[in-house]
């Protein structure tokens, strides 16, 4: 699976991965070592907890490595004038008479509460490839929502 990232998002993920490998991994190992000193491992909840934390850290490291190995940096210059991953889009919801400003990124960087939506979300997927003036319909359980695209920007 391809993971779409901005150059900044990739840099932040690389920094987080480095922190997990250099610091979090070591902290987990130290907790295991301390917990071993408490005696019988079969009844040692501190040891079990430390091993679980270590497994979680290793899983997160593998996930970050997979994302970085399978990532594609977003190049919005290729699609000037149309909505693409990396675009900032201003849409108008006619039903609620409101404008929304949305940035479309890959799922790794999405944060809907900050107006950053995934290209895989229903609205993100509906907007991709569209241009200013077009309307998109998003099918929701509560009914269809229609948005009109007012502006498309490619902020690099």
Image: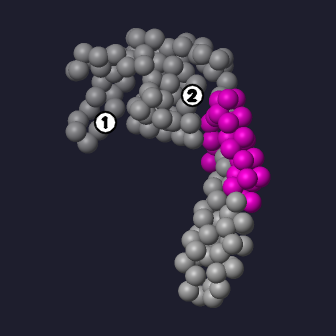
Q: Nearer the viewer, residue 55 or 2?
A: 55
The residue pinned by badge 2 equals 85
Which residue is drawn at the image coordinates 62% and 48% (left, top)? 1
User: Relative to 141, is 135 above or below?
Assistant: above
Which residue is drawn at the image coordinates 23% and 35% (left, top)? 143
Give the x, y percent position of residue 27: 70, 60
User: Relative to 108, is 87 above or below?
Assistant: above
Give the x, y percent position of residue 46: 58, 74
**Can you see residue 70?**
no
The circle on residue 101 is: none
Looking at the rendering, the stretch of residues picked out in magenta corresponds to: 1-26
Q: Are marks 1 and 2 in contact (CB under 8 Å)?
A: no
Q: Quarter of the image for the C terminus: give it.
A: top right
The circle on residue 139 is: 1
Identify the main secondary structure in magenta: helix
Describe residue 99's horizontal placement relative to residue 56 as left or right. left
SS category of the residue bearing label 2: loop
- The colouring scheme, among rainbow, by chain, secondary structure or one colour, is one colour
User: Relative to 59, is 128 above or below?
Assistant: above
Which residue is drawn at the image coordinates 67% and 24% (left, top)? 75
């Amino acid at each position: 699976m391809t993971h779409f990232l901005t150059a900044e998002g990739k840099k932040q993920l690389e920094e987080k991965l480095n922190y997990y490998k250099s610091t979090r991994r070591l902290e987990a190992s130290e907790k295991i070592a301390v917990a071993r000193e408490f005696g019988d491992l079969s009844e040692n909840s501190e040891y079990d907890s430390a091993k679980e934390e270590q497994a979680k850290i290793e899983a997160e490291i593998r996930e970050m490595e997979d994302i970085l190995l399978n990532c594609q940096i977003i190049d919005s210059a290729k699609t000037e004038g149309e909505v693409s991953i990396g675009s900032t889009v201003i849409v108008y919801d006619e039903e609620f008479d409101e404008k929304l400003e949305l940035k479309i990124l890959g799922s790794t960087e999405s944060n809907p509460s900050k107006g950053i939506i995934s290209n895989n979300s229903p609205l993100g997927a509906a907007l991709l490839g569209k241009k200013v003036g077009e309307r998109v319909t998003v099918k929701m359980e509560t009914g269809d929502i229609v948005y009109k695209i007012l502006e498309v920007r490619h902020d690099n």
